[in-house]
Image (cartoon, rainbow, N blue to C red):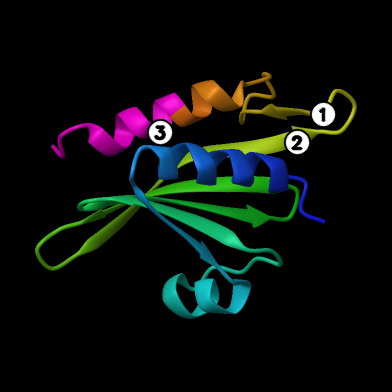
Amino acid sequence: MNKFASFFSYIDAEFKDLNYLVVEIEPKTLNHLANLKTTSNSLIVQLGEKAILFYVRGDECVVLGSVIGKSTRRFKQLLILTYNEKNHSIEDNTRNQIDKIAVKESLNSWLIKDIT
């Protein structure tokens, strides 16, 4: 089972509560759409021209931001999360424990921020 399943469920519920489009994507579909490989389902959270993609790569959860322009799409790596099995917590790329609520709020801020 995916170590991030509980985190993905939380993200799914929280962003749906905000009336954002949230789509679960199967591994083969993600590979077709974005040439990204994973062994578990991924999530896309969309708000207008911006979206956030959550997918598991090995032992990490990669969080990418996507911005659609007039004729382009840009991906930007927003976070790399790991799961600490000892204390059942999520850690950021500096190995500091990070609360899932803080992750959601930070990513929501990124989604609603004006594109510059």
Query: How far apart, in angstroms, are the residues tagged by discs 2 and 3?
Result: 18 Å
Residue on which the image places disc 3: 107
Name the image quarter holding residue 16: top left
Residue type marked 1: His
Q: Amino acid at mark 2?
A: Tyr
Query: Is disc 1 placed on a helix, strand or loop?
Result: loop
| Residue nearest the observer in this picture, 12 or 75 | 12
Magenta part mainly helix, strand or loop? helix
Q: Magenta stretch?
A: 105-116
> Which of the 4 quarters of the picture holds residue 77?
top left
- Ranked by sequence position, the earlier of labels 1 and 3 is 1
Q: Quadrant of the N terminus?
A: bottom right
- The picture places residue 65, in percent across and down from the top left corner, at 37, 47
Q: Is residue 32 above or below residue 42?
A: below
Label ID, residue 83: 2
Look at mark 1 in the image and give the residue it sits on.
Answer: 88
> In front here: 116 or 41?
41
Task: Name which residue lies at 54% across and 23% down.
Answer: 101
Can you say whether 55 is above or below 80 in the image?
Answer: below
Q: Which comes sooner in the sequence, label 1 or label 2?
A: 2
- x and y percentages locating residue 75 in the rendered image: 35, 54
The answer to whether mark 2 and mark 3 are in CB contact below 8 A is: no
Label 2 crowding class (10 Å Cα cut-off): few <14, some 14-19, many 20+?
Answer: some
- Residue 17 image-quadrant placement: top left
8 lies left or right of 20: right
Please, what secondary structure does the residue beneath circle 3 have? Answer: helix
Three-letter code for the amino acid on which mark 3 is drawn: Leu
- The reply, left or right, for residue 114 in relation to residue 90 is left
- Determine the residue positioned at 25% across, 62% down: 73
Q: CA distance from mark 1 to mark 3?
A: 22 Å
Name of the residue lying farthest toward the right? 86
